[in-house]
Amino acid sequence: MQRSSISTHIILILGALFMTLPIWVAFATSTHAPDTILREGLQIMPGGHFLENYNEVLFVEGGVMKKVTALAMLKNSMILGIGFAVGKVVISMLAAYAIVYFRFRLAVPLFWVIFMTLLLPLEVRIIPSFEVVSDLGLLDTHTGLIVPLIASATGTFFFRQFFRSVPDELLEAARLDGATSWGFFKDILVPLSKTMIAAILIIMFVVGWNQYLWPLIMTTKEENYTLVIGIKQIYQVLSEGGELPQFQKAFALTILATLPPVLVVLVFQRWFVKGLVESEK
Amino acid sequence: MKRVQFEHSPIPYLFVAPQIIIILVFFIWPAAQAVYQSFLLEDAWGLSSQFVWFKNYVDTIGSSSWLQAAGFTIIFSTLVTFLSLSIALLLAVKANEVIHGASTYKTLLMWAYAIAPPVAGLMGNLMFSPLIGDLYKFMNFIGFDFDHKLDPFDAGFVVVLISVWKQVSVNFIFFLSGLQGIPKSVNEAAVMDCRSPTRRFWTITFPLLAPTTFFLMVINITYAFFETFGIIDTTTRGAPGGATNTLVFKVFQDGFRGADIGGSSAQSVVLMLMVLALTVIQFRFIERKIHY
Amino acid sequence: MSGVELKGVQKVYPNGAKAIHGVDMKISDGEMIVFVGPSGCGKSTLLRMIAGLETITEGEISIGGKSVNNVSPSERDVAMVFQNYALYPHMTVRGNMSYGLKNRGIDKATIEKKVGEAAKMLKIDSFLDRQPNQLSGGQRQRVAMGRAIVRDPKVFLFDEPLSNLDAKLRVQMRIEIKRLQRRMKVTSVYVTHDQTEAMTLADRLAVINEGRVEQMGAPMELYSNPRTLFVASFIGAPQINLVPVRHDGSSLIAGALTLSGFPDLPRDADMMLGIRPDMLKRDDAGQCEVRVDLVEQHGGENLIYGALTGATLADGEEQEICVKAGQDLLPAHGENLRFSFDPASAFVFDRATGERLL
């Protein structure tokens, strides 16, 4: 027993290092001066330029992009993450409520319309989607960025599943208690779904924050970049070369782009795992 | 279906309306456009177009670059799925065994879920940078003539490594929760019936994890097809010479960079069919899962 | 005046399945009626139709003399206690009890007063601010009743409310429900599959089978005077002994066993003789010989299980029989005992139709 548990720990430690070390190295390297990095390569120990580097990336115009600061991109990412999560929860709860709790003529066809979204990931309709959004004049707007992303079926299916697991008797009791359809939703179903809502909000925040392809084609102006899009621009600059590559800034930006979703996942770990595992059932 | 529902009224339509409208405008309409455009050939200035039936399909899908991308996508997806599942399963089994530090290991192994693919891509890209990347130096130091900018195999290696790294945590979470879902009494009965832990794993635990594994396979294939776009776009971008082009990356390249709308749409439609196939397989499986 | 009347009530599901085949029933004001029957017989459906949770396909249901066919559940003035209690898990006990009153726009002070009274009556006033998951099964059951009581309904509906409780608590709550109902004098309909619960609670009980009311009446009437084979076998514990018999013109024949003392019955028809276990009396000159298999000692009485000598079934199996005897009769395994019964107190049923012949 004892021996096998030592090998178990060794495997787990190696796994943990494999998953963690790259991020640590990215962080450590981001706190060094550019010439140190060029001279010595990646760093394993933090250097003395933490405040200087992050200050420049976060607050100084032209510090990382041509004009926009990482702080502004952070704000855009926040709007995308939160807007996406909240929008998705609201839209999908309403739709799932209608599908599970009402008998109406178009219920089945509408369910299939929602189901269709599973078959149409953004990647297979990029160009026409771009055209639609640009025709509607929504390029470079928060609406155009968020709304097309929140309608996919995953959230609706998740809540549909959850609502179906709510005992029928609750609705019956509520109807005997004189609740209207909106009253039942607001007084019973939403409070009952609290933990589910929290779990989905967390997952969707991470998913929204990490969106890449859609913001990439949707935003043409630098001031609308999210951090994840900033990553792409940094890559562009690095690969085009030219002046002295600012590796410390690239690493600082990756850390900034990583930190908020990682914090959310770590702080709300239990809900996050629950939401993830349940939502995929 | 609920036993009791609210009566017929316009209310349910109000509840589903937001979602349905968004889907019609941003999903169904663009998808229909993609199908329509896949049958059109535009002239060089985009001024006029002509209905050409399946010419776009024949042209693009028969082209050597599409076949190359398809080939790479298959190899890439298989490798990413197999490797990330294996690593995650090993780690999940071990994490399920330990008593001390279990939650610390769990946290360290799953947090990479929160990292966006392009961020992982850029990080990997920097680690393999010939200028500062220690991994680049390391690979050459241990005897590989490593250059992912020029060598297709090395480029593939980089993309696979980063994609696997990014996916291990999701698989780990699912495997661990699958393992924890196996009743304790089943494990105890197995311990009494079979002495070898390895044999126990392959005859009891692994079959019980089969639903999770199958489900994760579908998820991983989808991931390798679509979500790795962000990784490829921040590492090789299909280089060298299209050797690391996935099908999705190629749709994007041809449509946005190359402005070949017809060809790109034809590729999109083919991708839709692939997603359809994956979904059908997944639902077949879910149905079976319900039955036993 | 709040009796309930059912006239030709039918329920057909959209898929064509017929759940209720024309039920007529009059429940008077303040009466406690129990619907009893095996699972799937339609008793819950019937109850839910009274509540308004299921639509009525045909017929009419009226409460207090007014048809309620087109009245929504919340306006029928009925209250229901569900099998799984259906408490709102996120609300406190107080919240659960007052939700229905709030929806009716009753002012806060009145709600507070009513909830307080009901809670006191049910002895749940000390945990009004707890949530359902902090309560035991019995306490949840009381809250569910409290939620029904505060609304001063015309009719109480109970849908197997005790089946989630353990045996001891079930007996205790059964008595409490009976007392409560007596005290409040509210018309009540109670659904259960447990015949002991049905017998003890009901003023009158309705035995339901396959969507029909087989018989309705006072518990003892159904016990001693069942109209059908189904009612005879469903009511009474331990179950009635049923022996397949024929009539040869003078007596009943069960295999090699001849039972005399029965008047004229159709000759050579397949019939079923029903003898309640407590009707068999120890008698060395009795017509029935029982080879004892085992004896269950229940304290005050012994249940003797064995085979009825001579009465071999068509498939060669022995006819099992149960005798309820006093605690002093304790035969050994394999012992043969003779019993007699009064043919006038036994029942004879037509096997094909289930109709009582005698």
Image: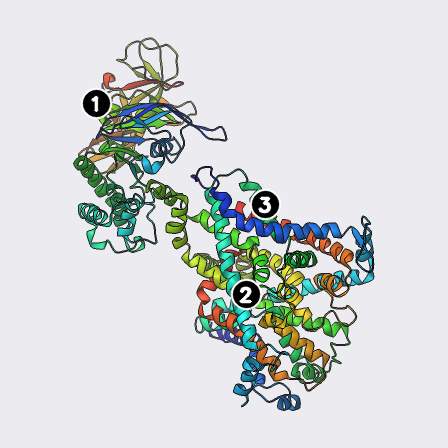
Q: Tell me if label 2 and label 1 are in contact, CB under 8 Å.
A: no
Q: Nearer the viewer, mark 2 or mark 3?
A: 2
Which one is earlier in the sequence, the residue at label 2 or at label 3?
2
From the viewer's perspective, is residue A65 above or below residue A101? below
Q: Residue A135: horizontal and vertical position, in percent?
A: 66, 57
Residue identifier under label 3 = A112
Q: Chain of mark 2?
A: A
Residue nearest the viewer, comparing A11 with C170: C170
User: Which secondary structure, mark 2?
Assistant: helix
Protein image colouring: rainbow
Instruction: Please give the name of the residue rendered at 34% of the width and 24% of the height, measured from the top-left corner.
Output: C213
Q: Residues within 10 Å of mark 2 (few under 14, many from 20)?
A: many
From the viewer's perspective, is residue B66 above or below residue C141? below
From the viewer's perspective, is residue A112 above or below residue A253? above
The mark found on residue B281 in the picture is: none
Q: CA distance from mark 2 to mark 1?
A: 93 Å
Q: Nearer the viewer, mark 3 or mark 1?
A: 3
Is disc 3 in the same subunit as disc 1?
no
Q: Chain of mark 3?
A: A
Instruction: Give the amino acid type for the residue marked by disc 2 in the picture.
Output: Leu
Residue identifier under label 1 = C284
Position of B134 with respect to B203 (left or right) is right
One can see residue B100 in this view? yes
Instruction: Give the amino acid type for the residue marked by disc 3 in the picture.
Output: Trp
- Specify the farthest residue to the front: A137
